[in-house]
Image (spheres, coloured by chain):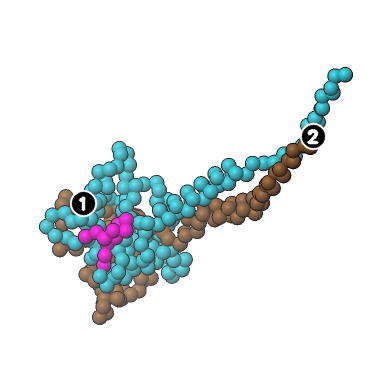
Amino acid sequence: MAKPEKRPEPAKIQPPMTPMIDCVFQLLIFFMLMPSFDSTEGYLTTNLPTTTGPNQAAQIDVLRIKIELEAIGPKGEGVSIILNDSETFGTNFEGLLAALQGLRAKGLPPDHPVLISPWMGTRQKWVVRAFDMAVAARFTNIHFAVPYD
Amino acid sequence: MARKKKSTVAGTGTVSFNMTPMIDIVFNLLIFFILTSQFTRLEIEDVVLPKSITAINKDTTTFRNVVINIVNPDSPTVIVFGQKVDHQIRGGENELTQLLKGRKASLTAGETMNVILRADAEVPYEDVARVMLAAGAAQIQGWWITTEIDKKEPKGAP
């Protein structure tokens, strides 16, 4: 009696997984590390005074250092710096820094209030630079004036 | 005659590692990190940030933060979570104040909240001031201004 023919088993095809695992792990490590690449941004931190209503701000009624920023130019793109209603520095932020450092050298404590009071139309970049100079002069109690509408 | 049992010596057969479950897990991880890296950028708009020499990197995940973007210096627009929000001051509370109050009400005991401002460098200050007023009205004190870290220091800086 003839033996029944065995059907040949279909060939098992298994693609090589090793290169795929390599690529997948590369992608995984990339996406895990990617959020940490963007480290060129930083933060300037301060505290806002709490308000009693939507259109009011707490007033700082002490002898504070006042840095006024006046927008100049046809579109307000420039700035003029006025310190304590007396000294003017034009656009010289280094001069402002030197003046603030001089005030610290005269004995003002780091938590002496500093008020940055930009005029209407002053660009945010000048406000940030003024804040920078106050921080660089080692003042820690810096506030922003809020114009009343 | 009894049959001899075939003895198998350990180590002579081939051992193959089953890759399928590992690929499943790795793909799950990959999809997770792709999606979460996109989620963290949803609240951030594309602005030209002002430069600062004293800005520092801070961990924004420590606090419950609200990122407020002010874009388009010619016609300043406040955008929070990809949505335009009215920040103009009129009688009563504006939309931004209500949004901030709502977010603050959702805090649990002991949690603090900060406003992270991402304003374009050319935005007029009065629009930033309106956002400040809204944050103050919502009793939020933490105010973080996002800037680009400028490595160049001015003369006289310590």
Of A110 and B97, the residue lying toward us: B97
Disc 1: host chain: B
Q: Residue type at mark 2?
A: Met
Q: Is residue A94 left or right of residue A123?
A: right
Query: From what the image shows, is residue A34 above or below residue A83?
Result: above
Q: Residue type at mark 1?
A: Gln
Q: Colour of chain A?
A: brown
Residue B90: horizontal and vertical position, in percent? 14, 60
Query: From what the image shows, is residue A76 above or below residue A23?
Result: below
**Outermost residue, right direction?**
B1
Taking the spot 67% from the left edge, 41% from the top edge, the residue there is B17
Q: What residue does disc 2 label? A: A1
The chain drawn in cyan is B
> From which residue to which does the magenta span run?
B76-87
Q: What residue does disc 1 label? A: B98
Disc 2: host chain: A
Quadrant including the C terminus of chain B: bottom left
